[in-house]
Every structure is written in C-alpha cells, then in structure tokens.
C-alpha cells in the first residue's frame, strides 16, 4: 500500500477503528468465558456482548492490541511502515514518526507485531526439497556472560546461533542469469546449540513435510535421514556454498545486512522477533500492496503474549 493510499483510507482514528472492527468480525469474535461465537455489538460501549453468557469483549481484547492503550492509528501507521518496504524500522524511528513521548510503549507495540508475524508463519510447515544450514548473528552479550572472558570466533558470547531452512526446488532449464534453484518458504530459528538432538526436534517441528534435505556433512545432521526420505550430505568447499546451498546463505546475508543497517546492539532474547519479521516479508515477497492487509488479519487473529521489558 502506498503512502498516499494509506492516508486516503485511514485519515483518522475512527477510520482505523472501523477497519479493525471489520476484520475482527470477519475472523470471528470468541467469548473468553464460554467460547460462544455469537455476539451483539454494543455501540454505546464499543464492546461485543456474548449472546449466551452476556460477557463483554472489547474491540482490542484477544488480538495483538490486547490491553494496549495506544490509539488504533498508531498501530495502523506502524503496520504500514513495517510492510511498505523490504527493510525495517527501529522502534526509535517509529516513535519519532508518531511523535510519541515515551519509547517503551512503542517498543512493545513493534515487538508485538513482529511476534504475530512469527505466529502466522508457524502455521506453515516446510515441504518438498529443502536447504538447511546454520548461521550466527552478532548480538549483545547477555547479562549472565558479561563477567566472563570474551571468547573468539563462533563460540563468542557476541554470537547467537540460528538454524536456517528454505524450500529449494531445482529449476529444469534455468535461463541465463537465473539461479538453478527456485526458493519457496523460509524459516529461521534461534537455537541454544548445534547438537543433533536440537536440530532433530526443530526440523521435525518446522519441516516435517520435507521429502529431501541438502546439508553439509556436519555431525549435527547425522539423524536427518531417519525421518526425511532423502538426505544429501556432502563436504562443501567454502567457495561452493553459494552454489550448493544458495538460498539459505542469501537469506542469512540479507537478514544480517538489514539488521546491521537498522538496529544497534540487538539483545539475543529479541533476535527471533527480528528474524520473524524478515521471514514474514520474505515469504510474502509477491504480495505487494496486499501485505498490509495480511498483517492486519494476523493482528486480529492472535492474542499477543509478549511480556519482555526493554533494557
């Protein structure tokens, strides 16, 4: 959605509230007390009333805006900013754009939206042939590690581990300049370690429909052949990684560039939220202007449980 269209559609608080109500009713309102799905709209109270038990539900209750005191228009402007470009916005920049005095409510709002992006993508399980590899992101040193000597390389406290998986089908007759593989859905998951048991559990959860998986010959992947029909493991020279596992490394490179250019000193406990935003937009890269509406659907569909406090 272009900025001009957004301003025309949502010029004030009331227009945002009415659109949110429209999407809320399309998804369906469920009574938190009895589970009833039939409600009256009490216009004077701006609340839904369950036809069965008379329990009232606010317009924001049970959605990403649950218990939020911020205006609907703040949420709509933020959703537009997050979906109008491939890049992202820091909470500080969104606070500046909104002209809000306090940083923390804006920070929470942005992270709540990133969390529902992740919840939406959790519904999709990777299928077909996939690429799988690990990656590392530079993050702040966690509180429990600050007093310990700083390690070097991949074991550094400044590195957070992650697993990356991408649907990657071979192209029959690629044209000149075209990549030999066509990418589908992408998953990025922050993990504690690269033990085979850890890898197994994540792949079972996120890629149970996979029929083949391409990896390097790391011992972390020794068990994949037990539950994926075909496991193609091979020693991959550094200069060949981009050919054999192209899409996971393009995704890692692009995600790192985006995070470095937008954010500073990311805390490891919040990295998953930033990756969820990156994957959400990557997986909907052809949605164009419809991306705002898709995020609006996700926002009314999930009650947010984000309770972290910003440092």
Image (tube, rainbow, N blue to C red):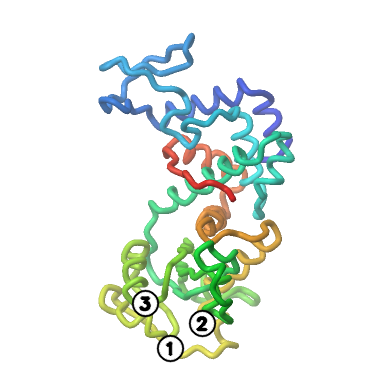
Sequence-first tag of 3 and 2: 3
Furthest-front residue in this view: 147
Mark 1: which secondary structure? strand
Whether residues under marks 2 and 1 lie with C-beta atoms below 8 angstroms apart, the answer is yes
Of the pair 167 and 256, the residue shown nearer to us: 256
- Residue holding disc 2: 244
203 vs 311, left or right, is: left
303 vs 240, left or right, is: left
- Residue holding disc 3: 195
Image coords of residue 247 (percent x, y): 54, 71
Is the residue 52 above or below the residue 179 in the image? above
* Residue 119, numbered label: none
Quadrant where the N terminus sits is top right
Sequence-first tag of 2 and 1: 1
- Residue holding disc 1: 234
Residue in the image at 47% along x and 24% along y: 59
Whole-number angstrom distance, CA of label 2 to CA of label 1: 9 Å
Mark 2: which secondary structure? helix
29 vs 180, left or right, is: left
> Which of pointers 2 and 1 indicates the residue nearer the eye?
1
């Amino acid at each position: 959605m272009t900025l001009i269209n957004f301003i025309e559609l949502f010029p004030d608080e009331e227009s945002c509230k009415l659109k949110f109500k429209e999407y809320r009713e399309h998804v369906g309102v469920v009574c938190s007390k009895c589970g009833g799905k039939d409600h009256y709209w009490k216009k004077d109270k701006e609340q839904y009333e369950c036809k069965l038990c008379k329990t009232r539900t606010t317009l924001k209750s049970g959605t990403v805006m649950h218990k939020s005191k911020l205006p609907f228009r703040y949420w709509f402007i933020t959703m537009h900013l997050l979906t109008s470009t491939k890049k992202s916005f820091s909470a500080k920049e969104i606070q500046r754009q909104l002209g809000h005095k306090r940083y923390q409510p804006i920070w929470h709002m942005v992270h709540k939206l990133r969390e529902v992006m992740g919840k939406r993508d959790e519904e999709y399980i990777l299928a077909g042939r996939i690429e799988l590899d690990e990656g590392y992101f530079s993050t702040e040193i966690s509180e429990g590690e600050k007093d310990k000597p700083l390690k070097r390389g991949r074991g550094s406290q400044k590195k957070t581990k992650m697993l990356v998986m991408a649907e990657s089908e071979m192209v029959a007759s690629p044209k000149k300049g075209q990549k030999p593989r066509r990418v589908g859905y992408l998953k990025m998951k922050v993990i504690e370690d690269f033990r085979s048991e850890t890898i197994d559990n994540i792949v079972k959860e996120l890629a149970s429909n996979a029929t083949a998986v391409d990896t390097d010959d790391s011992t972390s992947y020794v068990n994949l052949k037990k539950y994926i029909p075909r496991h193609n493991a091979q020693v991959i020279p550094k200069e060949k990684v981009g050919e054999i596992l192209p899409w996971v490394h393009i995704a890692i490179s692009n995600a790192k560039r985006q995070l470095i250019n937008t954010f500073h000193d990311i805390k490891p406990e919040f990295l998953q939220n930033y990756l969820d935003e990156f994957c959400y937009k990557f997986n909907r890269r052809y949605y164009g202007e419809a991306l705002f509406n898709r995020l609006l659907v996700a926002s009314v569909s999930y009650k947010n449980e984000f309770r972290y406090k910003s440092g």
